[in-house]
Image (cartoon, rainbow, N blue to C red):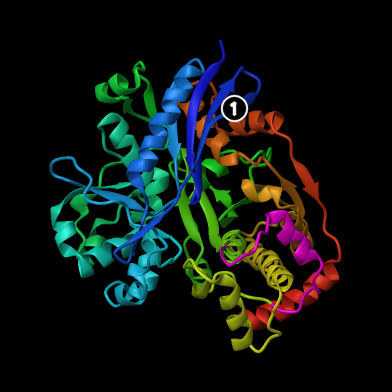
Amino acid sequence: MADRVLAVDFGASSGRAIIGEFDGEKITTKEIHRFSNDPVRAGGTLYWDFLRLFHEIKQSISKAALEGGVDSIGIDTWGVDFGLIDKYGCLLENPVHYRDERTKGLIAECSGTIPDKEFYGRTGIQFLEFNTVYQLYALKKYRPHLLERAQKMLFMPDLFGYYLTGRMTSEYSIATTSQMVNAGERTWASDLLERLGISPSLLCEISPSGSVLGDLSDDICSELGVEKIPVISVCGHDTQSALTAVPSCKKEFAFMSCGTWSLAGTELEKPLINDETFGMNITNEGGYGDSVGFLKNIIGLWLIQESRRHWNRHGGSYSYADLEKEALASEPFRCFIDPDCPDFVAPGNIPQRIRDYCARTGQYVPGSVGEIMRCIYESLALKYKETYRNLETCTGRVFEQIHIIGGGTKDTLLCRMTACSTGKKIIAGPVEATVLGNVAVQLMSKGSIPDVSSAREIIGRSEATAEYLPENTAEWDKAFEKYINIIS
């Protein structure tokens, strides 16, 4: 009989529930539920609508039962965000969205207590203003009463798991996104937290990816009319779920998980932390089997998604295909942005911020939708080139090809431009890498798949991929020189 598992995958704007079935040779998937994930601004704070999202998980379980049932459940989400649980086991408030501005300026403030080099040397995590440690510091600074009432902190996938099973844990991959884990020892860096005035008692024990969290609670089973089903702590961070599914037969490979964020990197057996990686602000994120995702977080399709939202809110009616056509019709290499400039993190009028950036840096100022889109596409492709060049420098590896996985593989223009910019062959797919990694970890937890290399081989023969070869590399190399001068 085939193994059947339920993967619930939350992205920054939507979620879906997919049944993965493994017959011993291939994994097939079937989507049974899809829903939007809409943040809510209230009282000046941007929140995730946790209760609604938990309702969608229960809907997913009910639909899975109607499909014949599943052997286990796994949940993955975005990183860094969390909920606080009080001494009565209740959620104190909706989790705050990482794009909320409460952490603005706090990296610099915390560096006065813990020098950046020391902080990075212990955690190996890229400095990002929304990392969990800065969110907790913001609570200590602005809302200390909330921290005083908190008994435990649970990252998003662990919070969902707690409400399903009644058990608390901190899964390894999601914990490392916090910038609070000692990278070498794989334990909480408690002394650093104490120096920032954050109590380590808030934190749960770190559990390995693939651990069994527990069975669905009696209350959940009674409400939904289902039998007991184990919940597996898969790689809770969606990036590490996706990395588990990279269909590479090589031990050393380059990948990019491309969606709202672009996570570009490679996989290592142990953290790589030195002056060079500190200077390049590269992250060492925990993965399945204590592996390390050595990668860079880059603002990705968010720039396109939020620009489209802005234009459509103001009377436009653009599909993503429309925006791609507009970009192709515009003159190439006229202006560039650094996608990771803080200007582009918050929701709002991204097109105007791009114009402001170009004016500030003495470039041609794009006016039309097509010119804005061309700027975004080319800037992303050039950012990827810069990133992989840095990764090769740090690791001593030379990557001849890059595996692009996730929803961004459907953006053929970005895939083509990335091949041209980097000068490397692009292997695009699978689209559902995060889900497949979620499914694979559940199957490995059960013993149906022996290890990650076997999982990747199985996914490789289960999913189709597309290839893109470099073209016009001399023109892109010239554009890269201009790009580097601008962002410097």
Q: Where does the N terminus fall, quadrant-wise?
A: top right
Residue drawn at (29%, 35%), measured in percent from left and top?
A: 163
Give 59 or 8, whichever is nearer the viewer: 59
Which residue carries the number 1 mark?
30
Above/below status of 312 relative to 270: below
Is residue 207 visible in the rendered image? The answer is no
Residue drawn at (25%, 44%), measured in percent from left and top?
A: 204
- Position in image of residue 188 (x %, y %): 29, 52
Side (left or right) of 86 relative to 336: left
- Position in image of residue 324 (x %, y %): 74, 60
Side (left or right) of 447 relative to 387: left
Q: Residue furthest top?
A: 1
Q: Is residue 324 magenta?
A: yes
Side (left or right) of 319 relative to 89: right
Residue drawn at (13%, 44%), measured in percent from left and top?
A: 87
Residue type at the position of mark 1: Lys
Residue range corresponding to the magenta coloring: 313-335
- Position in image of residue 219 (x %, y %): 25, 24
Q: Where does the C terminus fall, quadrant-wise?
A: bottom right
Above/below status of 223 relative to 167: above
Q: Residue furthest front?
A: 315
